């Protein structure tokens, strides 16, 4: 929750918070299993970071988001991780759609995006586009720690009600 609040207000997830979550997760994992369990969890963490790194390089995710998402294997049963990631990105998609439909400045970006799609598929056959008239795409990013926090809360509720066993 702290990461979500900081991501909304400061647009950054501080490294000290990520390190604290990492250390707490390693200690928690060590107490619940042994050193092999910790090594396995850290291996999964690195794998998730490597998978999400191209999204960071593309500008779709922030570095703090990638670090935060890569720490999930320390806290969740490995078999349930895909459910959490799917749920989190589904919540982010819902936020993006709501923002696009509700904010007037973003509706202009939808028109801009549709112009871009039309140009990409049909080129200049429909309407000639002169140099410099190519629609420029620029989208604001959603603070991804918020969908992350909502996904975590949903998993806690589902775990406590007995629907899905998320935790070790």
Image (cartoon, rainbow, N blue to C red):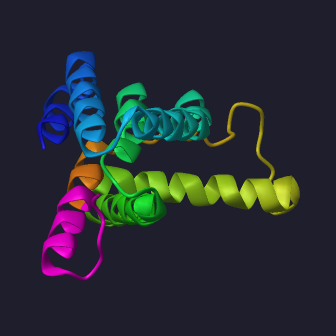
Q: Residue 65 in the image: state x and y as whole percent.
A: 37, 35
Return the residue found at the far top: 16
Position of the C terminus, as image quadrant, is bottom left
| Left or right of 43, for residue 91 | left
Q: Which image quadrant is residue 8 in?
A: top left
Task: Name the residue at 25% across, 82% down.
Answer: 163
> Which segment is the magenta one?
151-168
| Left or right of 84, for residue 16 | left
Towards the viewer: 127 or 9: 9
Task: Name the residue at 48% across, 58% down.
Answer: 110
Is 139 within the magenta? no
Task: Name the residue at 31% across, 60% down.
Answer: 95
Residue 3 in view here: yes
Q: Which image quadrant is residue 127 in?
A: bottom right
Q: Residue 137 in the image: state x and y as whole percent.
A: 56, 41
Q: What secondary structure predominates along the stretch shown in magenta?
A: helix
Return the residue found at the far right: 125
Q: How many marks?
A: 0
Q: Residue 40 in the image: state x and y as whole percent.
A: 49, 39
Residue 127 in view here: no
Residue 82's place in the image compared with 159, above or below, is above
| Left or right of 88, for residue 113 | right
Residue 50's place in the image compared with 155, above or below, is above
């Amino acid at each position: 929750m702290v990461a979500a609040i900081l991501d909304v207000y400061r647009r950054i997830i501080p490294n000290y918070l990520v390190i604290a979550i990492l250390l707490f997760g390693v200690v928690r994992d060590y107490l619940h299993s042994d050193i092999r369990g910790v090594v396995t969890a850290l291996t999964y963490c690195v794998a998730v970071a490597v998978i999400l790194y191209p999204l960071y390089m593309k500008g779709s995710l922030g570095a703090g988001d990638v670090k935060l998402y890569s720490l999930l294997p320390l806290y969740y049963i490995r078999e349930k991780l895909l459910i959490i990631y799917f749920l989190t990105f589904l919540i982010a998609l819902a936020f993006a759609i709501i923002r696009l439909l509700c904010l007037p400045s973003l509706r202009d970006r939808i028109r801009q995006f549709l112009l871009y799609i039309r140009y990409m598929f049909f080129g200049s056959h429909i309407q000639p586009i002169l140099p410099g008239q190519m629609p420029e795409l620029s989208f604001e990013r959603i603070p991804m720690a918020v969908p992350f926090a909502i996904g975590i809360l949903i998993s806690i509720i589902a775990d406590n009600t007995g629907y899905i066993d998320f935790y070790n």
